Image: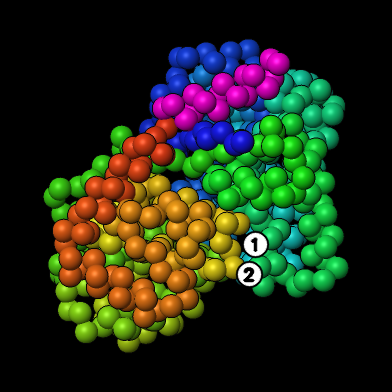
Amino acid sequence: MTESVAALAAFPDDEPAVTASAGTNALRDIRIHVITLNYHPEEIGIGPYSAEMAASFAAAGATVTVSSGKPFYPAWRIDPAFAGHRPHDRLRDGVAIRHHHIYVPTRPTGLKRIFHHLSFAAGILPHVLGIARRDRPDLIFMVAPSLISTVVGLLAARVSGARTWLHVQDFEVEAAFATGLLPGGLLKRLASAFERAVIRRCDRASSISPQMCAKLLEKGIAPDRVVEFRNWSDIAAIQPMAAPSPYRDEFAITTPYVALYSGNIANKQGIEILPRVARLLAYRTDLTFMICGDGPALANVRTAAIGLDNVRFAPLQPRGRLNELVGLADIHLLPQLAAAADLVLPSKLTNMLASGRPVVAGAEIGTALANEVEGAGLVVPPDDAQAWADAIEALLDDPDQAKAMGRKARHFAETRWAKDALLGAVQSRIATLVRG
């Protein structure tokens, strides 16, 4: 059976991350090297989770080093502060980080994404092998995406004698074929074989939902090596807001209600349905659709929303104001492509739940997303715009139901996604793995 653990998102640049595990020394004298394509200062997606996880390891007594790419997500442009081809070294929250130069396509097609991941693996290879020889880490902790870089981690573990842990945030191989980024046939068979071979060679493999852990089992790893390692919400920082969010004035929103989508705007999100839903509800003068974020599909979504007075756009907002942003919503919107079900679990869900607001999610019954939202919102077929519109109206027209679901959402955040016990649990698992 799988075991459930989780972690916490990163704090802003000017505020050190503080975790409940600080001072426990659960990982004292353990050396951990983390390989993760995404890292702070990326403000959404995998980066904040990897950064806070690494910081929590350091707070628990470990010596932690990180090999990462230069920040580029979700805009698919390298952050100007990290420009140039030379690596960028820094120390944050007791973690020594090296950001390596990577190829970042402005239009991330399937083939370009392959080169993107290959550039990361090739770029970190000398550095990671050098750390393996010099520092002899006890654990190589690898985050997928990028699965290709796992090969580097496995080589480093062989050099240093380290144990290995692969954490799957996203089944990128299956998702690429399921969403049409890559064609099937021989390429799919080769990629799937590579994925299975890599996963089976790891001492531990974890993922973020029961359904995704079941996929790890399908790929041939032994059940006693699989761990459920959930993403998380900072339930202390994200609290249900009683007063109106300051963003109402900043975005000049005058309607009583706001339906909010905030995050990455890309192919796996299925966000293209939201302008269709807004068009069906254009007659509701009491509702504004607010879309905050960035990503490769933003231009398409903007085009689809032309002529809709009930849709507003805003760029990605500072992570330090996340509570004010999620508190803007009366209803959270969480679209997802049906083809990506159980290959990813949107990380934005955790903060939606912590805000104490109901969620309308596009998911098939029985999927990980549907199971997590049940009771805390309404689940509709992913590509049924009318069902989306009906669900939003049902919550608007029944405020008692909406409030009850919001309370349930907060309860789920506190009981399923809180950081303290969950960070401690994964640290305990790591200590047991390393120390035997």
Residue for point 84% across, 60% down? 190
Asked if residue 391 can be seen in this view, the reply is: yes
* Image x and y of residue 325, in percent: 29, 53
Q: Observer-nearest residue: 269 or 367?
A: 367
Secondary structure of the residue carrying tag 2 is loop
View extreme (bottom): residue: 307
Packing grade of label 2 (10 A; few <14, some 14-19, many >=20) is some
Q: Which residues are magenta?
A: 420-436
Label 1 crowd (10 A; few <14 / some 14-19 / many >=20): some
Residue 263 in the figure: left or right of residue 308:
right
Q: Amino acid at mark 2?
A: Thr
Give me the disc on residue 179.
2
Question: Which quarter of the rendering shows the C terminus?
Answer: top right
Q: Amino acid at mark 1?
A: Ala
For mark 1, give the secondary structure.
Answer: helix
Q: Read off the residue under disc 1.
A: 175
Relative side of 310 to 362, left or right = left
Q: Which mark is residue 121?
A: none
For this view, does 117 lie left or right of residue 52? right
User: Closer to the camera, 205 or 42?
Assistant: 205
Q: Are marks 2 and 1 in contact (CB under 8 Å)?
A: yes
Quarter of the rendering containing residue 301: bottom left
